[in-house]
Amino acid sequence: MRLLDRLPKVRGTYAEQASMARHTWFGVGGPADVIFSPADASDLGTFLAACPADVPLLAVGAGSNLLVRDGGVAGVVIRLTDSLTSISHEGSIVTAQSGALDIEVARYAAKASLAGLEFLIGIPGSIGGGLRMNAGAYGGEFKDIVITAHGFDRQGNAITTTPTDLKMAYRHTDTPADWIFTSATLQATPGDTSEIKARMKEIIASRGEAQPRGVRTGGSTFANPEGGKAWQEIDRVGCRGLSVGGARVSEKHCNFLINLGDATASDIETLGEIVRARVAASGGPDLRWEIRRVGRPDGIKGVTP
């Protein structure tokens, strides 16, 4: 029986054997068995409540911090950025759905003369992904601004949680793997629009100077080790510019891996593992992947340092 025949009726759309490469910033990865784009949060809840328990589910947002393996993704990929993108505010409280891009939330807040969310302009992802990993940049983190997060568990039960409940820490939360966020309320403060926009321009300029642009990448590859910087460890062991197939360690910022145009997911993951192995072999820290790797294992290449 086709997987599609086992899935509940929805108001959104299903797509079978849909390429995931077009849904990630790396531009690599095999197909998903099914991609589901819910019509709205209610449609998502209905789907979850009726979806067979043995069907694997994976929620994705902007795909900026995601590496989909070449074997593709089993089960259903739930695309949140197709419809769950609304942003609103009441007073200094901003409500953003999980598929809303961080940069759009920052821009919305600026137009509303609300400060405190400027750092979101420097995070190339969506609100849902930021909640799950406590994303941060330029002096701010999600735990600093989130009041409550809302969503569903695997059975379609509504959930509401807080940063304290999630034990948000540096690039980490204790979010259960089967929770799917649908929205968050964010704390901002009244501010001066010109000052807010000026700060955002500073962040954009700083990012452009320090990070590779105009290339396919997944953002920061590894979380910074305690008391140090991942890029410094990578540079120290001579991995700047290192290549595997069509993947390369960025020469501009060596905590970024780049798809030169013909990389496979295996090339990228193999390169990352080689970097980790070289750093560890030199007595450095065990670098932790910040990029989320998903999909069917297809056997990455050797990782001898």
Image: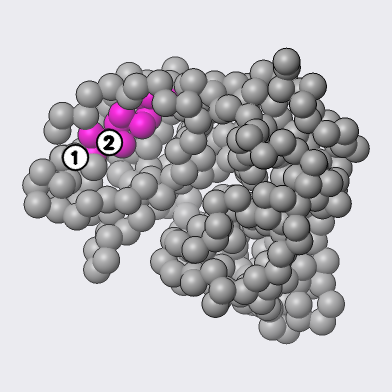
Quarter assignment of residue 301: top left
Which amino acid type is shown beneath numbered disc 2?
Answer: Glu
Q: Secondary structure at mark 2?
A: helix
Q: Is residue 187 above or below residue 270?
A: below
Residue 263 visible in the displayed image: no
Point out the image quarter for the C terminus: top left
Quarter assignment of residue 274: top left
**Alpha-carbon neighbours of circle 2 within 10 Å: few (<14), some, or many (≥20)?**
some
| Residue occupying the point 66% across, 76% down | 147
Is the Cβ of the residue at disc 2 closer than 8 Å to that at disc 1?
yes
Judge by depth and name the residue closer to the eye, 221 or 203. 221
Which amino acid type is shown beneath numbered disc 1?
Answer: Ala
| Residue occupying the point 72% across, 76% down | 114
**Alpha-carbon neighbours of circle 1 within 10 Å: few (<14), some, or many (≥20)?**
some
Which residue is identified by label 2? 273
Q: Position of residue 173 (x, y in %)?
A: 49, 63
Indicate yes or no whether the magenta region holds residue 116. no
Q: Position of residue 200 (x, y in %)?
A: 60, 65
On residue 277, which mark appears?
1
Q: Position of residue 131 (x, y in %)?
A: 59, 61
Q: Secondary structure at mark 1?
A: helix
Indicate yes or no whether the magenta region holds residue 271. yes
| Residue occupying the point 55% across, 51% down | 177
* Residues in magenta, as a range: 265-275
On residue 164, which mark appears?
none
Residue 226 visible in the displayed image: yes
Label 2 to label 1: alpha-carbon separation:
6 Å
Magenta region, main secondary structure = helix
Q: Is residue 184 above or below residue 279?
A: below
Q: Judge left or right: residue 123 versus residue 45.
A: left
Q: How is the image coloured?
A: one colour
